[in-house]
Amino acid sequence: MIEVSGGCHCGAVRFSARMPDPPVPALACNCSICSMTGFLHVMVPHDDFELLTGREALASYRFGTGAAEHLFCSNCGVKSFYQPRSHPNAWSVNGNCLDAPPELSVEQFDGRNWEQSRARLDEMEAGG
Ligand SMILES: [Zn+2]
């Protein structure tokens, strides 16, 4: 495991997280919100993530099923991590918001066809 830190653009939101040794698995998603925000997903179990500062700066946005909670800094607008629908026990940390990004192994996630893509992830995780 490696220890990383990161946060939003203005510095109000700061976090630390543990990730697997590089290359760290990451998902690039093409859904409506991820393509707009350029979010690069690194899934971090809730226990391996600590929000250091900025809880009060975080604003929340939900759409569609409402299962995902999109969190963004109310000051600078950057979404540095959020609660994804695909991984209820993990935060999705934005690989583009890390101070010193480790090498990432980026897979494409077809979020426009969410149900099929989530089922495919289950098959991959069960297989490996
Ligand atoms: Zn900010």
Image (cartoon, rainbow, N blue to C red):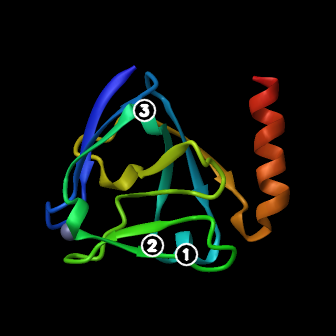
**Mark 3 residue crowding within 10 angstroms, few (<14) / some (14–19) / many (20+):** few
Along the polypeptide, which appears first: circle 1 or circle 3?
1
Task: State if disc 2 and disc 1 touch (CB < 8 Å).
Answer: yes
Some atom of ligand 1 lies within 8 Å of the CB belonging to the residue at label 2: no
Judging by the rendered image, the residue that carries numbered circle 2 is 37
Look at mark 3 in the image and give the residue it sits on: 47
Circle nearer the viewer, 1 or 3: 3
Give the x, y percent position of residue 72.
34, 70
Image label count: 3
On the image, numbered disc 1 is attached to which residue?
33
Q: Using residue 64 as the reference point, say whether residue 78 is left or right of it.
A: left
Q: Which amino acid type is marked by label 1?
A: Ile
Q: How much space separates mark 1 and mark 3, taking CA atoms?
A: 26 Å
Q: Residues within 10 Å of mark 1 (few under 14, many from 20)?
A: few
* CA–CA distance in space, label 2 to label 3: 26 Å
Q: Position of residue 18 (x, y in %)?
A: 37, 29
Q: Residue at x 40, y 32 (%)?
A: 48
Judged left or right of residue 35, residue 70 is left
Nearer to the camera, 85 or 127: 85
Q: Which residue does the image show at 47% across and 62% down from the upper left?
A: 39
The residue at 55%/75% (across/down) is: 33
Q: Amino acid at mark 2?
A: Thr
Task: Look at the numbered disc 2 and give the secondary structure of its residue.
Answer: helix
Among the two numbered marks 2 and 3 on one chain, the one whose residue lies closer to the N terminus: 2
Dot label at residue 76: none
Q: Quadrant of ligand 1?
A: bottom left
Q: x%, y% of residue 30?
A: 64, 67
> Disc 1 and disc 2: Cα gap in Å?
6 Å
Q: Amino acid at mark 3?
A: Asp
| Secondary structure type for disc 1 | helix
